Image (cartoon, rainbow, N blue to C red):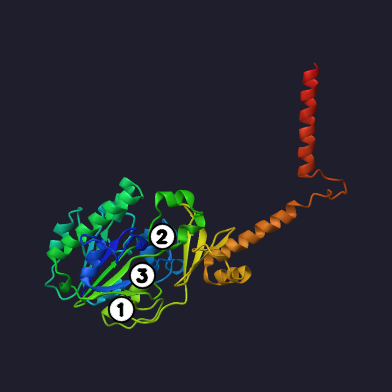
Amino acid sequence: MKILSIMCDMLRPNILDFHRCREDSYENLLKSLGGTYYCNCFSQGPDTGRSMGCYWSGMIPQDNGCNTRAKYPKFYLKESSFLDELVKEDFDLYFFTNPNEKILGDLPPTYETIGTHNEDLNFIKFIKGIDMSRSNIYAHLVLTDFHWALDDYGANGEGVEIGLRILKENISNLFHVISPDEFDYIIIFSDHGFKYDVEFEKENKVLLLNRDRSNTVMFIRKKGDDEFKVNEKLCSIIDVFPTIYEMIGKEYQGYGYSLFSDSEPEYIISEDHGSFLPQVNQRIEYWAVIKKNVIYLRSYTEYCRDDGKEFELDKKEFDEFLCDKSMSFKEAFKQLNILELYKVMASDKSVYTNGEARYTIGKYNLIKRFRRKLNKNRKRNI
């Protein structure tokens, strides 16, 4: 069994056009491979650390330990990964990623030293080093070129065009060295999307969790697939775990559904921070309940839909649902209610406990302004 996974960092599905793509485009490359593209795949935590925690463990962030942006799998993943099962099945493991980014810990604990790893960014040299004569292979290739292009040229049309070109060239070069049919399965996916610079500047921040960032690329090709198909089932990055188990013929009981099955969740909950910059003890400030045709969004103060239509759900019931499903929202909601009680407490400015009348803040400020005005008048009269 030979499995290839290619992670295309920050690639956003809704910038891809499979209907009107150029012959030399990234989209046409996927179409030429054949296989299935899952257009409704989402991440429960749209940043690399949390998303890869979901990928390796098959569990949502609040349960796998990687529940904030800075909590990468190497340091925080508290559940086993599907790599453990592959090792038991005597798979040879190959990992390609930027050595300077690997130190952040995007691999599960201990796997930084298990298997074959690249020493530099010479992609073709690493690919040629994969021993395809072996019976069982899992090769995990992380391509961050698209992300780098947006860093270098901006999250704009130019950055996207350059990033897609380099990404397509790398994958094309890979399949010139190793034929796609040498792999039993090929998984091509992204960990999260992105916002264009203009979107980030002008949009309501609660829209950080709409499809632009929470929707992820998910493509699977089985050996012999010639036809390119689009599957609209609702799925998420945690579904890779049961899919890998099905590939190697292992029974799975846990989160998610195999991408090969017709089963799908009723909803997916995604959570995000208010800032893109990693911080200590970073808070979750945005929540999304994702359904196939609509995303319901919640911040500390707002309820909305991703399509701009009126939020038609009962807000009390929606909050109760989120409290039941999301530990971060449950804690935030409790504190929001306490803040409301603070307002009630602050409004009580009647008397001291001995019965004397108190100045309210309003009275205090009024008197302060009166005395300031009186002092100005006195100075004018001197």
Number of residue marks: 3
Residue lying furthest top: 382
Please give left or right for residue 309 compared with residue 13 in the image: right
Camera-side residue of 270 and 227: 227
Q: Residue at x 11, y 72 (%)?
A: 133
**Amino acid type for the residue under numbered disc 2:** Asp
| Label 3 vs label 1, nearer the camera | 3
Local crowd at mark 3 within 10 Å, few (<14), some, or many (≥20)?
A: many
**Amino acid type for the residue under numbered disc 1:** Tyr
- State the SS at label 2: helix
- Residue 39 image label: 3
- State the SS at label 3: loop
Q: Which residue is mark 1?
A: 245
- The correct choice, above or below, for 89 with respect to 304 in the image is below
Q: In the rendering, at what x and y percent does residue 131 appear?
A: 13, 68
Camera-side residue of 339 and 192: 192
How far apart are labels 1 and 2 at the CA level?
30 Å
How far apart are labels 2 and 3 at the CA level?
13 Å
Q: In the rendering, at what x and y percent does residue 374 appear?
A: 80, 27
Q: Do residues under tags 2 and 3 come within 8 Å of each other at their CB atoms? A: no
Query: Where does the N terminus fall, quadrant-wise?
Result: bottom left
Query: Where does the C terminus fall, quadrant-wise?
Result: top right
Q: Residue at x 31, y 71 (%)?
A: 37
**Amino acid type for the residue under numbered disc 3:** Cys
Q: Which residue is mark 2?
A: 212
Camera-side residue of 29 and 106: 29
